Amino acid sequence: MKKNNSKLLSIIATVVMAIVSLIALFPIISMVLSSFIPSSSLMRNGISFSFPWSELTLSNYTYIFTQSAEYWTWYGNSLWISALMIVLSLFFSSMVGYALAMYDFKGSNLFFVAVVFILMVPFEILMLPLFQLMIDTMLIDTYLGVILPGVVAPVAVFFFRQYALGLPKELMDAARIDGSTEYGIFFKIMLPLMGPSLAAMAILQGLGSWNNFLWPLLVLRSNDMFTLPLGLATLLTPYGNNYDILIAGSVMTIIPIVILFLFFQRYFISGLTVGGVKG
Amino acid sequence: MKIVTNPVTPVPARKKQNKLVRFLNSKKVVPFVFISPFVLSLLLFTVYPAIQGVMMSFQSVLPGQVEFIGMANYERVFNPTFYRAVSNTTLYVIFTVLILTIIPMILAVILNSKHVRFRNIFRASLFIPALTSTIVGGMIFRFMFSEQDSAVANQFIGFFGFDSVKWMFSPWAAILLMVLLASWRWIGVNILYFLAALQNVPDEMYEAAQIDGATRWQRFRFITMPMLKPIIVFVSTITIINGFRMFEESYVFWAVGSPGNIGLSIAAYIYQQGIQQNDMGFGAALGVVLMLIIFVISIIYLIATGTFKKEGR
């Protein structure tokens, strides 16, 4: 009797989760499918349960690969900005997190409290003065203007600090005896040990900047500087004159990410749930 | 290893170093070198703009001509469009908090139970929407919720006998669209928070309760829920804060001009006034008001849920 009961529960629970998962995946699957039908059909019917299987075509993709230089400019911009963002922010944030974890220095606690407090200031109050600052420093409409304000990410600093706290300090002493400088210890010994946390933060920063919208929307003014989200947003007009690029283009912005996710799930998850790490 | 065989060699090497290197390498200086880029960027990109933002809200900012105008910007803040933005944003916050706390909690409890198979597949599929940008996600939603009878949303309600709805043009549906988009994107992340918290609930508590004859519901209500309380507070707090800052969910459906402002959020209003109308002073005043709203509501919420009480004891 009890065994039957638990078997039934197991079936119900699994079915419920399967349905919920399907609902979550439905928009993505239907987007991928819709990228293989003519955009005129998509515009006429929207995304529909009755999928027009007879209209399948590769025309959106041939168009985007042969006719749409604009899209690839945006793709390039997004790649550059995300890559720079990852490299710079990992470099600076890991240094800070490491220093906070490994050295006792004057004012480190006060510093920590100040950071937490500053973290609570919403971006919306910063964005207009920052925008003004970018105009004054001529960084408007440049990669650097998009990247700089985000380079030292407090979340990443916390994450690195947490991770570095778990590293063996004896290694540092051993290296000191060996004549290594403090900087040498960091770059040659400790940084490699922080590998997993670097991977998680690379993903957090990369994904954040790949998908970022509001700040690039303010900084980037000309079409050939746009990132993918900005460029795609310009195609989102009710007239539908660019839907062939829009939908196939959107698929190509998320498919690489989904593939990366399937390979590096662990790092994605620890990166994206970093808010839960308590100091 | 080296450490044992020749611990003396570094000393002559160190003598060669000049004073500057020795100074930079002293344990007192090193941490400050390490944190200096952070301090610099914090001052330049957070502290300075924050102060500037508050100043701006008392100014009229025109190119090459900035003057203090007292409270004039704040007097203009409380207008019908602002009230519309506040009520839209508040509704959005209420619904996202309810959906993004309750549903992930239930799904996490189911996923955590021994009964479910293919757990990792389900977890991954629920997480995948978090990888899309709001723009791409919103684009898909626009096609799913387009006004034709043949679009998914209208087909679905049609199945229950309802007439087709012009989703992007009716006030209640506008809020619904934004809430659904945000919920779809964030559910997987919140499930992970709850799953992490559930791992910390000791199995013995359930076993003891089972021996005492507690029902499944009682076990959930009196063991799981209290154990999950910190994470419930955490998840709902970040959802409230992010909710009041909502911008992209509104932008992707209507850019900045929704009919009758049905989709206008506070952040979208700041963008509209500060950047598009170039009225930076007024935009900054809106920003300050938004910041105060966020501070006050989060503090009230944290007090009401008793988060501060524990630390006081």
Image (spheres, coloured by chain):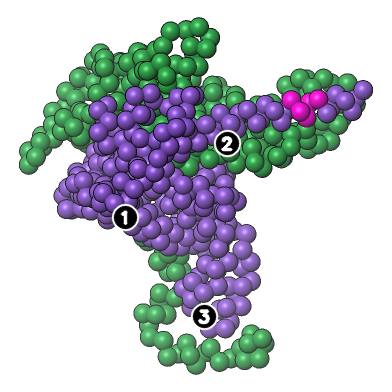
Chain colours: A purple, B green
Discs 3, 2 touching: Cβ within 8 Å: no
Of residue B87 and residue B167, the one placed in the foreground of this image is B167
Q: Position of residue A41 (x, y in %)?
A: 36, 29
**Point 63% across, 87% down: residue:** B2
Closer to viewer: mark 3 or mark 2: 2
Q: Main secondary structure of the magenta part?
A: helix
Point out the stretch of residues depicted in magenta.
A8-12
Specify the farthest residue to the right: A1
Q: Chain of mark 1?
A: A
Disc 3 packing (10 Å; few <14; some 14–19; many ≥20): some
Kindly tell me whether residue B191 is visible in this rendering: yes
Occupied quadrant, residue B133:
top left
Of residue A34 and residue B287, the one placed in the foreground of this image is A34
Of residue A100 and residue B98, the one placed in the foreground of this image is B98
Determine if the magenta segment contains residue B133: no
Q: Which residue is mark 2?
A: B126
In terms of secondary structure, where does tag 2 sit? helix
**Which residue type does callout 2 highlight?**
Leu
Q: Chain of mark 2?
A: B
**Which residue type does callout 1 highlight?**
Gly
Mark number, residue A76: 1
Q: Which residue is mark 3?
A: A180
**Same chain letter for marks 3 and 1:** yes
